[in-house]
Image: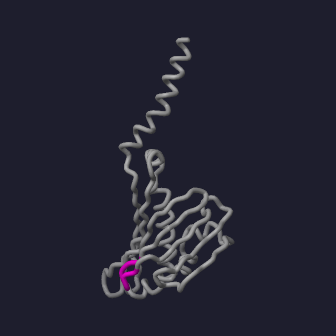
């Protein structure tokens, strides 16, 4: 009987500890990477404002060039939606919509993931002129994990998971534009 009591206490602790930790772990996270591109800001903006161009530099597009893509709206304008379906679990199923644009400076996206998990997050490109012929491009992501799933952030390094893909994509973007 004593061993059953010990097993129950240990089992209860294994369940309770992550739930208690999730109460104090942040639910929001963000990741940013940047690159300097030797082109004027407007020229960089005129390329990245088209979601279809992300197929040329995005790491996720490189992971599955055969993914099924569908589009709705006018590319390069608020409301344009690019949807994807992939058998690759690292790519999954989802869509990205342009939700806000500040001409020459910033583009914001809504990301709606459907598989392998459901989530709604935001991404953006921010551009800043370093000088007349050089632009700093920041690619960022803002995510949210609800309680108790936010306890996963204790063991998941989102900076590495997403940040490395952003860095690789920005390096490809730089090579394309320069």
Q: Position of residue 82 (x, y in %)?
A: 56, 76
Residue drawn at the location 48% of the way across and 67% of the way down: 166
Q: Please say whether residue 145 is visible from this viewpoint.
A: yes
> Along the horizontal axis of the image, is 108 left or right of 114?
left
Q: What kind of colouring is applied to the model shown?
A: one colour
Find residue 31 and report its horizontal and vertical position in percent.
41, 61
Res. 178 in view: no
- Based on the picture, tell me whether residue 144 belongs to the magenta stretch: no
Q: Residue furthest top?
A: 1
Q: Is residue 50 above or below residue 119?
A: below
**Furthest-left residue in this view:** 131
Q: Camera-side residue: 1 or 14?
A: 1
Left or right? Give the position of 151 relative to 4. left
Q: Is residue 89 above or below residue 41?
A: above
Q: Is residue 1 above or below residue 79?
A: above
Q: Residue at x 41, y 78 (%)?
A: 100
Residue 37: % across, % down: 41, 79
Q: Is residue 102 magenta?
A: yes
Q: Quadrant of residue 114?
A: bottom right
Q: Residue at x 68, y 62 (%)?
A: 87
Q: Quadrant of the N terminus?
A: top right
How many numbered marks appear?
0
Residue 141, image x and y in percent? 43, 65
**Residue at (66, 66) in percent of width and height:** 86
Start-end of magenta stretch: 101-107
């Amino acid at each position: 009987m004593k061993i059953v009591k010990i097993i129950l206490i240990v089992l209860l602790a294994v369940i309770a500890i992550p739930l208690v930790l999730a109460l104090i772990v942040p639910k929001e996270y963000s990741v940013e990477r940047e690159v300097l591109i030797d082109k004027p800001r407007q020229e960089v903006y005129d390329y990245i404002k088209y979601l279809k161009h992300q197929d040329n530099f995005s790491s996720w597009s490189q992971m599955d060039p055969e993914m099924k893509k569908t589009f709705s709206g006018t590319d390069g304008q608020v409301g344009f939606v690019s949807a994807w379906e992939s058998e690759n679990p690292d790519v999954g199923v989802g869509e990205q919509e342009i939700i806000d644009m500040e001409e020459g400076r910033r583009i914001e996206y809504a990301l709606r993931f459907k598989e392998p998990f459901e989530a709604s997050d935001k991404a953006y490109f921010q551009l800043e002129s370093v000088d007349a012929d050089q632009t700093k491009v920041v690619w960022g992501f803002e995510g949210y994990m609800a309680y108790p799933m936010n306890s996963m952030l204790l063991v998941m390094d989102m900076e590495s998971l997403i940040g490395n893909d952003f860095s690789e994509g920005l390096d490809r973007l730089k090579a394309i534009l320069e």
